[in-house]
Image (cartoon, rainbow, N blue to C red):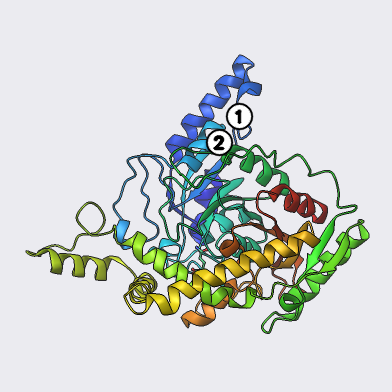
């Protein structure tokens, strides 16, 4: 808590600090230590944890970094947050993000940008920028984020921390404000692979409150010391030759591949022929789902209500126009257009077909390899304001989006500093669905 006080004035990762709740949980851990029952506590006993601000925690503000929810106080707790608390974690507070998780830089937050702790002139990535920055700046041991197209992995790479988007269905989405329900997945940020794996053990498993969550008995820590001897690691030539991939990121990934080969893994080239269409499919499917999900912010039941209106139509219109920022409005308008009659058949339906093709690409690739090694982001952290047009910003996720479309696991593993920029570079490890332990095993070999 002292460190947050000292450091966060510059970084701005926290939107709310729940000091009392953290102290109360800590005194429970102290009491267990005094009573000699510490070992009976959960795997996160005494570990300071903070949550992205799209996760409900009873009695805290859950703003999604939006004016729309500026005064919203959670009446309940999300399953992912509850599982951290049940495992003994100390809740430090809520973390800044892009508004409703739309973005790759945390610049769309209504409550100011979060700074990258490596260079305060630069963005931490997004949308879970606060979650990545808080771990990088030593303000929390573990944080939770959410990833719809890259929002855990890309900020993880910009801030140089381990960041895992598990297979869709590993972690319950109950109580996490929805963006794209078929793509959203919660996962941990941590300083090392073991901490991330321990947190996944606490988070994972079936939740009757989220029908897409799965029974999951994986021990994510089980394979960490096994090494990569005999593993087949896939390299996707089209990713490595992608236009826009900077040479420092490419050479760092190549060095990571060489390291795995030296440790006994075999490198195998695999093709994902339809991955090039992932970005287009995502910017149809994502806005359509976001448009549907955000229709609940109607100014009547909760959220910002513009005062002084006497008919419902103008109240809706003014409240949504003022409550949502520009990127949220862009997504809503795009989704509303794409789902309208006549247009639906031209975009939404083909995008779903592309989704199937991409999923099949991964299934075929994983017949040849155990894990894929790829870039996370084409480049290291950029400066505030440097990427100003939306379509260039969307390209930040060019290597991460196809994983959400297919639903399998992906993670960022920090692999050093770029030779040109001196900023953190991350490698993406991609695993077949529900074989997330494989990618953690490979990450461990790169640690
Ligand atoms: N940057 C992507 C977007 O803006 C992904 C965001 C996310 O994963 N939540 O939609």
Residue 160 makes an appearance in the image? yes
Question: For the view shown, which residue lies furthest in the left direction?
Answer: 310
**Mark 1 CB within 8 Å of ligand 1:** no
Question: Mark 1: which secondary structure?
Answer: loop
Vertical relation: 121 (above or below) 242: above
Q: Are marks 1 and 2 in contact (CB under 8 Å)?
A: yes
Q: Give the crowd class for mark 1: few <14, some 14-19, many >=20 residues within 10 Å.
A: some
> Residue 110 lies in what quarter of the image?
bottom left
Percent from the top left, x then y, of residue 409? 64, 55
Question: Mark 2: which secondary structure?
Answer: loop
Percent from the top left, x then y, of residue 366? 74, 60
**Residue at the (73%, 53%) spot, across then down:** 439
Indicate which label's residue lies in the foreground, 1 or 2: 1
**Residue at the (14%, 67%) spot, across then down:** 313
Q: Give the total of numbered labels.
A: 2
Percent from the top left, x then y, of residue 311? 8, 65
The label shown at residue 89 is 2
Q: Horizontally, is 2 left or right of 225 in the view? A: left
Residue at the disc numbered 1: 42
> Residue 40 lies in what quarter of the image?
top right
Q: CA distance from mark 1 to mark 2?
A: 8 Å
Percent from the top left, x then y, of residue 204? 58, 41
Residue 400 makes an appearance in the image? no
Q: Give the crowd class for mark 2: few <14, some 14-19, many >=20 residues within 10 Å.
A: many
**Residue at the (93%, 60%) spot, across then down:** 262
Question: For the view shown, which residue lies furthest in the top direction?
Answer: 35
Q: Earlier in the sequence, mark 1 or mark 2?
A: 1
Q: Horizontally, is 67 left or right of 128 in the view? A: left
> Residue 57 lies in what quarter of the image?
top left
In the image shown, does 45 or 292 lie closer to the viewer? Answer: 292
In the image shown, does 2 or 100 lie closer to the viewer? Answer: 100
Q: In which quadrant of the rendered image does the C terminus lie?
A: bottom right
């Amino acid at each position: 808590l002292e460190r947050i006080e000292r450091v966060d004035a510059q970084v701005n990762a926290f939107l709310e600090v729940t000091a009392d709740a953290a102290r109360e949980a800590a005194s429970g851990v102290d009491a267990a230590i005094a009573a000699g029952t510490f070992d009976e506590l959960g795997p996160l006993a005494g570990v300071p944890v903070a949550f992205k601000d799209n996760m409900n925690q009873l009695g805290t503000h859950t703003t999604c970094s939006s004016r729309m929810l500026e005064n919203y106080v959670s009446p309940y707790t999300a399953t992912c947050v509850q599982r951290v608390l049940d495992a003994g974690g100390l809740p430090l507070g809520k973390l800044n993000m892009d508004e409703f998780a739309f973005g790759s830089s945390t610049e769309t937050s209504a409550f100011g940008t979060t700074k990258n702790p490596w260079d305060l002139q630069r963005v931490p990535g997004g949308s879970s920028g606060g979650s990545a920055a808080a771990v990088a700046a030593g303000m929390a041991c573990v944080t939770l984020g959410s990833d719809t197209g890259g929002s855990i992995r890309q900020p993880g790479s910009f801030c140089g921390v381990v960041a895992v988007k598990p297979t869709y269905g590993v972690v319950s989405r109950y109580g996490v404000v929805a963006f794209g329900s078929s793509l959203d997945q919660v996962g941990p940020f941590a300083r090392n692979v073991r901490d991330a794996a321990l947190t996944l053990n606490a988070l994972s498993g079936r939740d009757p409150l989220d029908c897409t969550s799965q029974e999951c008995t994986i021990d994510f820590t089980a394979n960490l010391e096994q090494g990569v001897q005999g593993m087949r690691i896939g390299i996707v030539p089209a990713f490595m030759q992608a236009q826009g991939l900077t040479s420092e990121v490419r050479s760092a990934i190549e060095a990571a591949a060489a390291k795995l080969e030296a440790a006994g893994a075999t490198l195998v080239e695999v093709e994902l022929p339809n991955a090039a269409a992932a970005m287009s499919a995502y910017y149809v499917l994502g806005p359509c789902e976001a448009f549907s999900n955000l229709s609940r912010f109607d100014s009547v039941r909760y959220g910002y209500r513009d005062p002084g209106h006497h008919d419902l139509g103008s109240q809706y219109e003014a409240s949504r126009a003022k409550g949502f920022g520009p990127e949220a409005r862009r997504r809503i308008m795009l989704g509303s257009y794409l789902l309208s009659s006549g247009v639906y058949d031209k975009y939404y339906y083909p995008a779903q077909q592309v989704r199937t093709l991409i999923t099949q690409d991964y299934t075929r690739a994983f017949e040849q390899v155990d894990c894929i090694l790829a870039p996370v982001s084409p480049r290291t952290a950029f400066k505030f304001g440097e990427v100003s047009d939306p379509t260039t910003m969307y390209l930040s996720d060019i290597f991460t989006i196809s994983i959400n479309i297919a639903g399998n696991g992906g993670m960022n593993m920090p692999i050093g500093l770029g030779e040109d920029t001196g900023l953190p570079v991350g490698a993406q490890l991609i695993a077949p669905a529900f074989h997330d332990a494989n990618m953690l095993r490979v990450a461990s070999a790169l640690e």
